[in-house]
Amino acid sequence: MIKFVSVDRVKPGVTLARDVYGIDTFTGRIVMLKAGQTLTVSHITKLMGLDLQGVYINEKRIAREIVPNDTKRDLIKIFDDYHSHIDSASFGLYTDRIDAANSVLSDLVDTILDYDDLQFDIDNFDFHENLRYNHALSIAVVCIAIAKELRMKKGDITELAFAAIIHDIGDAGIPRELLDKPAKLTADEFDVVKTHTTLGYQALMSSTAISDHVREGVLSHHERYDGSGYPEGLHGKAIPFFARIIAVADVYSALTSARPYRSAYQVAEAIEYIMGNAGRQFDSGVVKAFLKVVSPYPIGSCVKLSSGEKAVVADQNPENPLRPVIFLIDDPTAVIDLYNDKCFYNVVITEILEN
């Protein structure tokens, strides 16, 4: 991925994606650095002496590093354990691996907490080719990031991540043909699928090692802030806190994933849906935290505007991540705040460009 970064944020070891040249303001000499060059401290010092807003670098997407391969493998094993050891009649849960699960998730929490400025885009959630695995892992990661933004304690974040990983555990009691149906469910079929929350809760009741917070997250993650959800039609703060967080992450992951009966939403469309339902379907405080960690247009992204111009995202607008601060590629001095500048209210971002 090619990313534009300000000079003061360039770190040794990155490679330039485009040529850089200019006149050093201190020596008067022409400085030329070629694309593909790995930057050293000396190179960065030279860049600091140039009159540049920033440079284009080749950046490996952070998404591939958020969940290391070993952690992914362990999390998938946990996911399999909890789904394969539920008896379809009694829903008794196999819980021998709870300590192992918490250990792996604690390490994942530490990894995410270590990021000073964590921000996801859609490629962050390409963890596994299996849709069910990918859905569970992506929800856990987003929940951890939201919890970090909400300044939750690490132990609570680890519990939340566990609830997120197994939030759909009740699916084991739903006929597979309904879960995999390549078309929209009928009203009767949907009523059957909705029982997965209660079935999952009942399965978890067999283990005293699982906290009430985790069980509540599993039972209530489809409740909605306005009372329109299920299984109990809870309103507002009556919905358990874990469930309010999982609900936002669950909907975002579902919308941005392709289904047999529909294509995936664009990231901006999914975020706009969640923003538009803050205070209705979702807790506004959770949505606010979500918007700080999941962005349709990460800083440094090259984007195309409805005016036909190309621009680079320079900063986020926390009030509306769909309308960031940008500068035009053809005129880097033209910095535009798409949210606050009235002259550009009719301009929108239409797509992200790789180059």
Image (tube, rainbow, N blue to C red):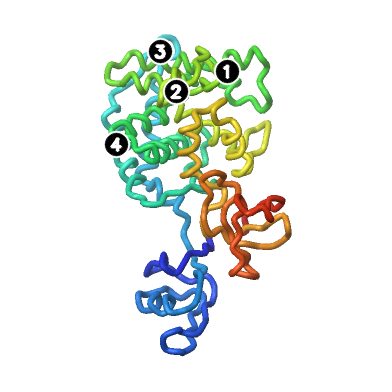
Q: Position of residue 317 (x, y in %)?
A: 53, 49
Label whose residue precedes the other's in the sequence (3 or 2): 2
Q: Which mark is residue 228?
A: 1
Label whose residue precedes the other's in the sequence (3 or 4): 4
Label 1: how many Cα within 10 Å (few below 14, some 14–19, many 20+): some
Is residue 278 depicted above or below 311 in this figure? Answer: above
User: Is label 1 in a helix, a strand or a loop?
Assistant: loop
Amino acid type, residue under disc 3 in the picture: Gln
Disc 2 designates what residue? 169
Q: Position of residue 241 (x, y in %)?
A: 41, 25
Q: Position of residue 219 (x, y in %)?
A: 44, 18
Foreground: disc 3 or disc 4: 4
Foreground: disc 2 or disc 4: 4
Residue that lies at the very extreme toward the top in this rendered image:
90
* Mark 1 vs mark 2, CA separation in Å: 22 Å
User: Is label 2 in a helix, a strand or a loop?
Assistant: helix
* Mark 3 vs mark 4, CA separation in Å: 27 Å
Label whose residue precedes the other's in the sequence (1 or 2): 2
Q: Is residue 298 left or right of residue 103?
A: right
Disc 3 designates what residue? 202
Q: Nearer the viewer, residue 118 or 28?
A: 28
Disc 4 designates what residue? 154
Q: Which mark is residue 342?
A: none
Label 4: how many Cα within 10 Å (few below 14, some 14–19, many 20+): some
**Quarter where residue 46 is shown:** bottom left
